[in-house]
């Protein structure tokens, strides 16, 4: 998460709010998710930034979140390398515990 979140107030006409915000969902969370997903679609933020901003713990959960919104992940070479390094570290730690 980011250290100091910015608070933004948005006024949405009642007749549109019902169409924009799914029933039972927190309106501020719905607007936040929509804004961040759109920024991700437009390549203004990375998948990692999206994941952090929304408090999503794993890449797998992020994939599901985006798939539910019909957003397909563009997986960069840098992201693949970072994931590979994490996997190598995890496997190395596991093998050390076995010994």
Image (cartoon, rainbow, N blue to C red):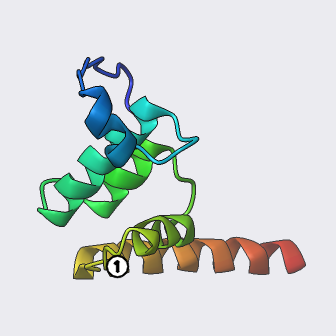
Q: Is residue 94 left or right of residue 90?
A: right
Residue matched to label 1: 81
Which residue lies at the image location 39% right of the left edge and 23% below the top edge? 3
Residue 35 can be seen in this image = yes
Could you tell me which secondary element the residue under label 1 belongs to? helix
User: Vertical placement of 93 versus 75: above or below?
Assistant: above
| Residue 2 in picture, x, y percent from top left | 37, 31
Q: Closer to the camera, 67 or 58?
A: 67
**Where is the C terminus found, in terms of image quarters?**
bottom right
Residue 99 can be seen in this image = no
User: Vertical placement of 27 versus 74: above or below?
Assistant: above
Which residue lies at the image location 57% right of the left edge and 54% below the top edge? 57
Q: Closer to the camera, 8 or 45?
A: 8
| Residue 23 in picture, x, y percent from top left | 53, 44
| Residue 31 in picture, x, y percent from top left | 33, 39
Count of numbered badges drawn on the protein:
1
User: Vertical placement of 9 versus 87: above or below?
Assistant: above
Q: Report which quarter residue 38 is drawn in.
A: bottom left
Q: Is residue 92 left or right of residue 30?
A: right
| Residue 22 in picture, x, y percent from top left | 47, 48
Q: Residue furthest right?
A: 98
Q: Closer to the camera, 50 or 88?
A: 50
């Amino acid at each position: 998460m980011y250290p100091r979140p910015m608070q933004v107030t948005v006024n949405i006409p009642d007749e549109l709010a019902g169409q924009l915000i799914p029933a039972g969902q927190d309106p501020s969370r719905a607007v936040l998710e929509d804004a961040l997903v759109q920024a991700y679609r437009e390549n203004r933020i990375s998948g990692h930034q999206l994941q952090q901003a929304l408090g999503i713990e794993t890449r797998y959960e992020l994939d599901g979140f985006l798939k539910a919104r019909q957003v397909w992940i563009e997986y960069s070479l840098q992201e693949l390398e970072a994931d590979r390094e994490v996997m190598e570290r995890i496997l190395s730690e596991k093998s050390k515990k076995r010994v």
